[in-house]
Amino acid sequence: MSLAPLSATAAEVTHFRTFGFVRLRGAHDDVAPAVTEAFEDVLGRSSPGRQAGAGVSRIAERSDVLRAVLLADHRCPRLARRLLGTDVVYAGGDGVRHDGAVEWHRDGDHRALRLLKIVQYLDPLRGRTGALRIIPGTHRRGGSWDTFTAELDDPLRRLGMEPIDVPAFTVESSPGDLVAFDPHSYHASLGDCYGRRQITTTYASVPESDEARRELSDYLLADRPALRESDDLPALT
């Protein structure tokens, strides 16, 4: 499979660093059908049937197509280096067919570890059908957002509004789009979104401090069962 290099413009880099996310429209238009076919093949082998809630860890390593599209050095790793501005290490990913909404949350409370999650949704998603919602700027650590957990854990009681009404940017997307975001941002997928399919790959900046190294180790080990499940996978090249 011959694939062009994947990167981001200076404006897209600035958008990511300012708001914590960027949508790359049409970045995978040419490979979207092949990616969807590979997703269904991998999930079909691991979870026969098309039930919602099915998922598999490290999906990109289980398919030659997904390995080429998502893990080749000139593709997502290059994009991650461009957005984070550092060398990066691959920190895993998954393929999931979601069975409903995902409420407001952050992926961990790391103080030094820098992460980037790259996600491709395999279905058109809009505001009321499960599109990713992000509260811009909440990826920045050490500020007032770090004390806002209780409000987003229970917005109806604490803010007087339903989770879907929390002010946020809705990243509507089509199957060929990529969404790259800092998973320390407050994010959610809300509305009528059963059967929503997604593929993610996650990258971390190469740690430059003892604290960052500890946090990366903790991040990788947090999903230990999934890592054990992946022991029989071929090594990345």
Image: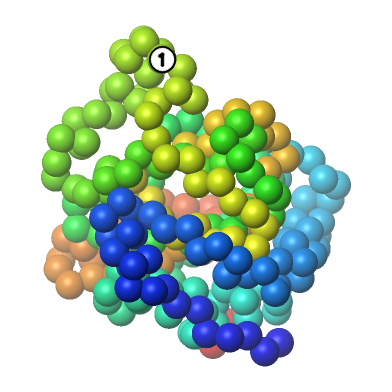
Q: Is residue 192 above or below residue 140?
A: above
Give the percent coordinates (x, y) of residue 29.
Answer: 67, 69
Task: Indicate the quadrant containing the N terminus: top left, top right, bottom left or bottom right.
Answer: bottom right
What residue lies at 50% left-to-right and 46% top-to-bottom? Answer: 171
Total tally of numbered discs in the picture: 1
* Mark 1, other Cα within 10 Å: few <14 / some 14–19 / many ≥20: few
Give the percent coordinates (x, y) of residue 173.
Answer: 59, 51
Residue on which disc 1 sits: 161
Furthest-front residue in this view:
11
Q: Is residue 28 above or below residue 55?
A: below
- 63 left or right of 49? left
Q: Is residue 173 above or below residue 26?
A: above
| Color style of the picture | rainbow
Residue 140 seen from this side: yes
Quarter of the rendering containing residue 7: bottom left
Task: Indicate the quadrant containing the C terminus: top left, top right, bottom left or bottom right.
Answer: bottom right
- 223 left or right of 1? left
What residue lies at 49% left-to-right and 74% top-to-bottom? Answer: 76
Give the percent coordinates (x, y) of residue 156.
Answer: 40, 13
Residue 221 seen from this side: no
What residue lies at 47% left-to-right and 52% top-to-bottom? Answer: 223
14, 192: nearer the viewer: 14
Q: Is residue 210 above or below residue 68?
A: above
- 234 left or right of 89? right
> Could you tell me the amino acid type at mark 1?
Met
111, 136: nearer the viewer: 136
What residue lies at 35% left-to-right and 39% top-to-bottom? Answer: 135
Dot 1: what SS? loop
- 181 left or right of 74? left
Quarter of the rendering containing residue 195: top right
Give the percent coordinates (x, y) of residue 103.
Answer: 48, 30
